[in-house]
Amino acid sequence: MKKNVKPQPAIFYDVNGTHKADTCESLKAASRRGELHLAGLAHGCYPGIKMPVKLLSELCVYCVWDANKDQSWGLEQHRNEGIELGYLTRGTLDFIVDGIHHKLKAGDLTITRPWQPHQVGNPLISASRMHWLIIDLGVRRPNDVWKWPNWIHFAKKDLNRLTQILSHNEQVVWQGNKSIETCFEKIAEQTEATENPEDIQTRLEHYINELFIEVYEMFQNKTIELNPRLSSTQRSVEMFLAGLSEHLDYPWTLEAMARHCNLGRSRFAHYCKKITNMTAADYLTHCRITKAQTVLQTHPHLSILEVAAACGFESSQYFATVFRKKIGLSPTDYRSQCRSKEA
């Protein structure tokens, strides 16, 4: 009998297809309840009119909502499969990226990359008119190569410069301008006026290109600090290792960790050693034992077997052996010691 294999978690977006984009179910439900106006063009499960598969396939979604009252929903933390540009034309909006809270006001432009977890609402949405579009550029990690669609019509040097700015600077909120707002509203006008996306393909391409031109011009008029390290391989490994503690119940191997970072085994091992001064296996064990200590203290109702499973150990016996070697006590004795200190 074939053994069930646990799906690999997605510390980065869409590794081997195991992680899907936020499908905005709460937004769709609010629209069905008539709590706000919603218009969109979408591929996949995003809200809006479904686009033919080959029509601007890299455009995951364009959407605008218009909520004239505070809402009973919000979008939980998620990552996107592409770069997302958002623009708030009216109202205010809570926007949390990488754990940092931003209070958006009318005229703010947001830019989030696929590796930046973000949440819209805190936890609920306030009265607002918000535009957003997501374009899949083939990047999932900071060091991936950006692949722009062939319908983005930029001179090569300008596209290279735009890519450099977007990949070497991760500022989330920018003060937009009327030209950028006009581009979003033109896309909204076309979206709301059609039932067949193929009828507006030319205008849609034109307005999206115009939008990126205006964003590029905005960048040209600002002094922007660029940091090439933001797109380095080492940073991708650092981000993976930082997220590893949330997915310790997966049966990680060196190959699986390297593959998650789109690296070969030796290169991943090199960066892991450089960052942690441990081998990948030792660092994984360190994370699992650290988590086990916390679980033993905070979840006294769990059996040792359950603690072992939650921390990624295949058996309670192996868990006890490794735990005693690292901590000097058995898991049971460690839990008892923690209880006696609390008494």
Image (tube, rainbow, N blue to C red):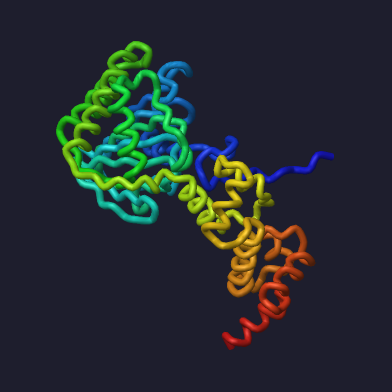
Residue 276 x, y percent position in the rendering: 54, 61
Whether residue 74 appears in this view of the structure is no
Which residue shows up at 60% across the image and 45% down it?
258
Q: Judge from the rendering whether residue 44 lies leftward or rightward of residue 281; answer left or right.
A: left
Tell me the quadrant of the picture where the C terminus can be found.
bottom right
Q: Position of residue 256 (x, y in %)?
A: 64, 45
**Rendered location of residue 220, percent (x, y):** 20, 36
Asked if residue 231 can be seen in this view, the reply is yes
In this picture, is 162 found above or below 263?
above
Left or right: where 341 falls relative to 97: right
Quadrant of the snapshot with the N terminus: top right
Q: Nearer the viewer, residue 228 or 307?
A: 228
Asked if 200 appears above or below 247 in the picture, the reply is above
Residue 325, quarter of picture? bottom right
Q: Residue at x 32, y 55 (%)?
A: 101
Residue 315 at what x, y percent from top left?
Answer: 77, 61
User: Which picture quadrant has residue 189?
Assistant: top left
Pick out the residue farthest to the top. 199
- In this view, the residue in front, 109 or 88, is 109
